[in-house]
Image (cartoon, grey):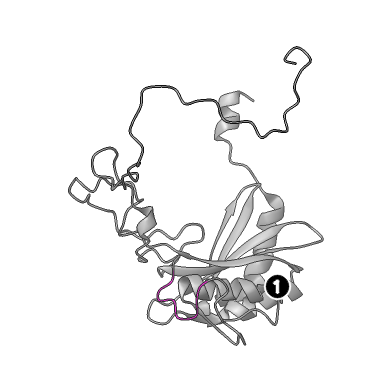
Amino acid sequence: MSSSNEATTPLVDTMREQMLVAIQTSLGDALVESQIKSLDDLWIRVRTDSWRASVKKLRDVHGFDYFCFLSAIDWMPSPYGRGEDDPTEPAPIRDTTIRSGYAGGETRIQVFIRIVNSTTHLGITVKADVADTALVIESLITIFAGANWHEREAHEMFGIDFAGHPDLRNMYLPADFEGHPLRKDFPLLSRMVKPWPGIVDVEPLPASDEPASDEPADDLPTSGNETVSDDAS
């Protein structure tokens, strides 16, 4: 087979394809969309109201018993750009289209969990939409205890409430902190870049009381502990 044919032949990932068929049969209508990246990974998106039940079934029926992490993502393009816009120029026209990545999505914010089958060593990324009008989804801590702090972080950084979680206190920010820093509409001013030179605010150094001199400074005085060579004596 020529190299050109090899380049155009799609890769077949038999193990993940068989795994997906079994998951589709098991989850039924709870499975909304799926996507396989051959020889790399499998993503599935489940209904929001089936989030907890789907993850539990993946653990108990399909052997995904190892919890890696849980997090959230805000797919909305940042209204502040990438922080590299020149403030002296007119604001650019930004693309506001929301693109939800692998396995699609219908909302701006999604939660996702990464779990692995400790026998086959195959992993799966499971995600679910979180309604824009009510950022609430079921907690998974009774299925994977390790999700505890991950859910707390997602609550703190994205404003998602995990129903059934007993303690969603902030982990990093003060309790009275306003806003959620990982949401794209959070005005993180440190992202803004100022062109230099010309409009950067520079604080001048304090003036010296001593007159300026072009003469080199004298050598620093010795401490008295230096060893004197025999030649010097």
Determine crowd level at label 1: few under 14, some 14-19, many 20+ residues with C-alpha closer than 10 A: some
**Label 1, on which residue?**
146
Pick the residue in front: 69 or 23: 69
Pick the residue in front: 201 or 217: 217
Q: Position of residue 204 (x, y in %)?
A: 31, 45
- Look at the image and say whether residue 113 sits in the magenta stretch: no
- Amino acid at the residue labelled 1: Gly
Pick the residue in front: 88 or 182: 88
Pick the residue in front: 65 or 208: 208
The residue drawn where x is 62% and y is 42% is 11
Query: Residue 42's quadrant in the figure?
Result: bottom right
- Look at the image and say whether residue 175 sits in the magenta stretch: yes
Q: Is residue 203 left or right of residue 14?
A: left
- For the C terminus, which image quadrant? top right
Q: Is residue 134 visible?
A: yes
Query: Residue 216's quadrant in the figure?
Result: top left
Q: Is residue 168 left or right of residue 55?
A: left
Q: Given the current orientation, which residue lies at the most extreme right position?
A: 119
Q: Is residue 216 left or right of residue 165?
A: left
Q: Position of residue 140 (x, y in %)?
A: 64, 79
Q: What range of the chain is rendered magenta?
A: 173-180
The residue drawn where x is 35% and y is 51% is 83
Q: Given the current orientation, which residue lies at the most extreme top position?
A: 231
Q: Position of residue 173 (x, y in %)?
A: 51, 72
- For the N terminus, which image quadrant? top right
Looking at the image, how many numbered discs can be counted on the residues?
1
Main SS of the magenta part reads loop
Helix, strand or loop for disc 1? loop
Query: Residue 34's quadrant in the figure?
Result: bottom right
The residue drawn where x is 59% and y is 54% is 36
